[in-house]
Image (cartoon, helix red, strand yellow):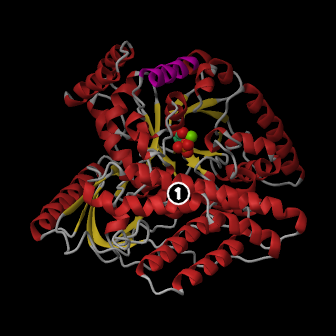
Amino acid sequence: MKTDRRGKHPTTGRGSAGGTPKTVNAAYQGIGVSPGIAIGPAHVVESGIPQVPEYTVEADALDAEVARFEAAIAKARKQVGKLRNKADALPNTMLDELGPLLDAHAAMLRSGRLTRGVPARIHEHGINAEAAVQAVVGELVRGLAAVDDAYLAARAQDVREVGDRIIRNLTETPYQAFSMLPVGSIVVAEELSPADTALMDPARVGGFATALGGPDSHTAIMARSMGIPAVLGATALPARVRSGTVLIVDGEAGRVIANPDADTLADYRRRAQALIRLERQLARLRSQPAITTDNARIALMANLELPRDLETARRGGAEGIGLLRTEFQFMNRPDLPSEDEQYATLRQLVEGMHGKPVTIRTLDAGGEKLATALGDRIAHSANPALGLRAIRLALKEPKLLETQLAAILRAGAHGPVRILLPMISSITQVRAVRVILTKVVRRLKRRKARIADPIPPLGVMIEIPGAALAADALALECEFMALGTNDLTMYTLAIDRGDEQVADLYNPLHPAVLRLIRFTIDAGRRRGIPVSICGEIAGDPRYAPLLVGLGVKELSMGAAALPRVKQRIRRLSLTAATQRAAAILDQVDEGRIAALLDDFNDGL
Ligand code: PEP
Ligand code: MG
């Protein structure tokens, strides 16, 4: 039965909603990454490419163009491979549908007329890879469509879909802006990048759900910071719903329900109302300090992903910004922001905090956080997480860093700022930044620009195990340290934080991670410099007793998490938390550690 496998489509959602006839209460399990309940019509993101750039390429650059194509093919193979692995875990009915389809795509990406035809076309016509893919796909599709046969028509569709995927990888096109969606829509996609997510307006997008993505990916972090309920890793969902299907996203349980019946809808509406009431109660804590029952004061700061998080931070009573991720300034644009442009944005944020400190991290591009404008310089590493990213890129492209430091120094004339360096692994890097900082200060003074006075403190992120182990040396070179436990967990355990396939192994409570955290805190204490935590564990109330018990005095988190963490801190005693943290640090078994922590939380 050649045609049977063509029921549904893994990315565009042209399949029938939740099965045919319409399956009521069809449930899809994924990973809940941003709590809350959203109910609304699905908007299934089409993976088609709106515009394919076309230009001629000089003869001496044609090999590089072929290499770009090959990198895009390699990425496509990985994407399809990941989906295929996950599909194996699906119930048989879903697997029968998706498995053969993905196998066909994988075969086409391994070798065939597409993989051979495109490099030949690039060389023969002297054109860019995207245009060559489009031309070759067009030829193949026309050939297949010329014969009146359902199987061949399905093959033509496969070719188009594979071609679209390759072109998306080549252009790194973000999905369409979500500004035209009906209010309350649930965005459904195979995968959403942080840049895609940045385009979502929480007033319009009720929630989102994807087939791929892990719990501490930046897409997940962004969802939490925007307060948008989200489920990642719901493998079969995009293939089985279509736009308009009513969905419930339960961001706590990690579940999506398609075509809910009246009882289910009523139940989830009740739960959503209860959550809103709870948020209102928590909001009353806004002006209360985060203080333990035995009077230890903890500073609660906000992490900012996007300027619009500032309002949530203020509403949550943030005592400052503990981590401003500047990547947003480089996203969804083809060029780099100028010093003036960066300054204007940073100044607004600094002024918006009314004298409270703003910790500005220099660009942490690379890994999954690709900035289109930098694409060529950082996109082609075999191991992007270990490649030219963050401070390594900044020191290799000092102009980039100088421009950003100049903007930060100028913004610092309008309120207190701190400069934070991502992915530091050695004291040499901190010294090199200091030399550049001094040079930029001198240059700005010559220009008679108004800058921060005194020069802002310089801090380092501790997010590489080697940096944690060298924390006492690093502490001599900087004025503060910020523990980035998201990357620290990833690099310590060798688990990709964005990969849902190994999400169950990603565990900040692993004894190795906890020992590195303690080591860093102790080093900071010995050297007399503050150590904060700005990884995602800082925003999870469950971890608060452990972190406070380990001696942390400053926690920085997604702004939406502030009230819940504050509530937990106000219930605990520092003495008891310190004892429990010591008991936890004595354990080697992750399960026992989790049990000791949960037991402590249950008693609060
Ligand atoms: C971290 O790694 O913990 C961190 C805070 O930085 P980011 O999540 O931006 O990598
Ligand atoms: Mg990090």
Q: Position of residue 223 (x, y in %)?
A: 42, 56
Image quadrant occupied by the N terminus? bottom left
Q: Identify which residue, 55 or 63, lies in the foreground.
A: 63
Is residue 207 visible to the viewer in this orientation of the structure? no
Q: At 19% across and 27% down in the image, what residue appears?
A: 603
Q: Is residue 199 above or below residue 384?
A: below
Query: Is residue 44 shown above or below 589?
Result: below
From the top left corner, tell me how far across and down residue 177 is, in percent. Answer: 51, 73
Residue 517 in magenta stretch: yes
Q: Nearer the viewer, residue 211 or 32?
A: 211
The single residue placed furthest to the left in the displayed view is 263
Find out whether residue 482 is within the magenta segment: no
Amino acid type at image mark 1: Pro
Mark 1 residue CB less than 8 A from any atom of ligand 1? no
Ligand 2: quadrant of the figure: top right
Residue 508 at x, y percent in the picture: 42, 31
Say which quarter of the image contains residue 393: top right
Secondary structure under tag 1 reads: helix
Query: Who's the residue at 67% across and 46% down the image?
Result: 362
Q: Which residue is mark 1?
A: 194
Q: Residue 139 falls in which quadrant of the image?
A: bottom right
Of residue 403 and residue 343, the one placed in the foreground of this image is 403
Q: Which residues are magenta?
A: 511-523
Q: Residue 489 at x, y = what percent?
A: 49, 32
Magenta highlight: main SS: helix
